[in-house]
Amino acid sequence: MTHSPQRYLMYIAQNYSFAILRPLQQAILKQGGQVCWFFEGDDVDDRFLHDDEQRLTSVTDVKNWQPDAVFVPGNVVPRCIPGIKVGVFHGFNAGKLNRRGREDHFEIRGCFDLYCTQGPDTTARFTQLAQQYGFFKVKQTGWPMLDPLFTEPESNPYCAIDDPRPTVLMCSTFSRNLTCAPHLYETVKALVATGKWRWLVQFHPKMVVETVAQYKALQGPNLTFVETDNVIPVLQAADVMLCDTSSILLMFLLQGKPVVTFNNQHPLPHLLNVTVTDEVECALSEALTYPADLMANIKHYCQQIHPYQDGCSSERVLAATNALLDDGLLELKSKPVNIVREFKMRKKLGYWGL
């Protein structure tokens, strides 16, 4: 019988990572393991840490604690952090291209020993890359963050039980080329004024402050601006989403709910995409009727990106991690050393030890 390791580090750089890793933390604690958190950089607000969660504040502390495995929802983790490195992703593949013109979701940066993929559409590509590079393994597990999406919350602060109006959730990415928020402000302002729908607005934490201020100013009986480290209840509270090319729309679709997009980069049949602001109201009205062909396209698409609706993806990630720990990394090649990135990360963490 193999002995499951006990120590798991949650290595995060953004507030939204708490919600990604907490279902996994729950699974670890249920199995008798230990969990500590480590914050990279200044973007993580320690007020989001719960009273019963432990934080290690330096690389030296992490080295003294000696985690067996490190879970990373970001793109990189430095070599000076001990333990096998597991990539669990900070979102779905939304098709965004990086500065090199490559799909960022599949960019291999030489940091991870294991990628836990979300569904068939990304597993196939990562499996090819694993064969090509030879220094990491791939296991399709589903995404821990979605475990709560498939369990009904006891109460939801974003639901208005006494308000019969349909609820529209507007989300937007921060990237200047892709964001819909500045372009749709006047449209949303006019629609909010009609009062026919209830609006929730939730933006990426890196959204331009001027845009955030504009939308916050629309708050009132018809619109609530949401700032949270956990978007799941917000997604559950809405009937339809208005978005752009942000990967959050994929999480919304997984509930079997329609999404209207503005200038989406990949306007496939599971989306209602519009390219001019005048079409937004009509598209939202159509989406709220849940058209049969659109819903069939959504169902088919969801099977490709995340076929699991059992709320047990965390357990699968943990099982894959423990299996790799039990088997060891001997059959894998050594990960490449990126000296420039390692230097930058150590500088960011203020750590120059061995």
Image (spheres, rainbow, N blue to C red):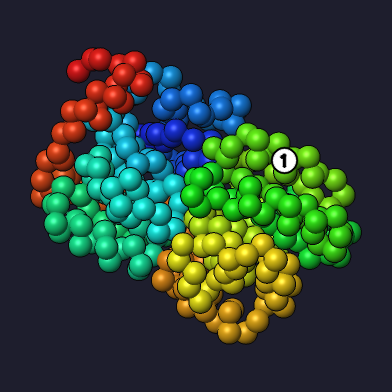
Identify the residue shown where x is 31% and y is 19%.
347
Query: Is residue 331 something one can see in this rendering?
Result: yes
Across and down, in percent, residue 168 comes to: 72, 60
List the single residue furthest toward the bottom.
292
Q: Is residue 138 left or right of residue 229?
A: left
Identify the residue shown where x is 41% and y is 43%.
73
Quadrant of residue 208 in the image?
Answer: top right
Estimate how packed mark 1 is, as few (under 14), some (14 to 19) or many (20 or more) residues with alpha carbons within 10 Å. Answer: some
Q: Secondary structure at mark 1?
A: helix
Query: Is residue 61 something one can see in this rendering?
Result: no
Q: Amino acid at mark 1?
A: Gln
User: Relative to 344, does residue 240 appear above or below in the rendering?
Assistant: below
Image quarter of the C terminus: top left
**Total number of numbered labels?**
1
Across and down, in percent, residue 12 comes to: 43, 34
The answer to which of 252 and 26 lies nearer the viewer is 252
Identify the residue shown where x is 18% and y is 28%.
339
Q: Is residue 274 left or right of residue 288?
A: left
Across and down, in percent, residue 129 comes to: 20, 57
Q: Is residue 91 left or right of residue 342?
A: right
Identify the residue shown where x is 78% and y is 40%.
217
Quadrant of residue 78 in the image?
Answer: top left
Across and down, in percent, residue 146 comes to: 52, 56
The answer to which of 35 and 125 lies nearer the viewer is 125
The residue where tag 1 is placed is 214
User: Relative to 226, does residue 197 appear above or below in the rendering?
Assistant: below
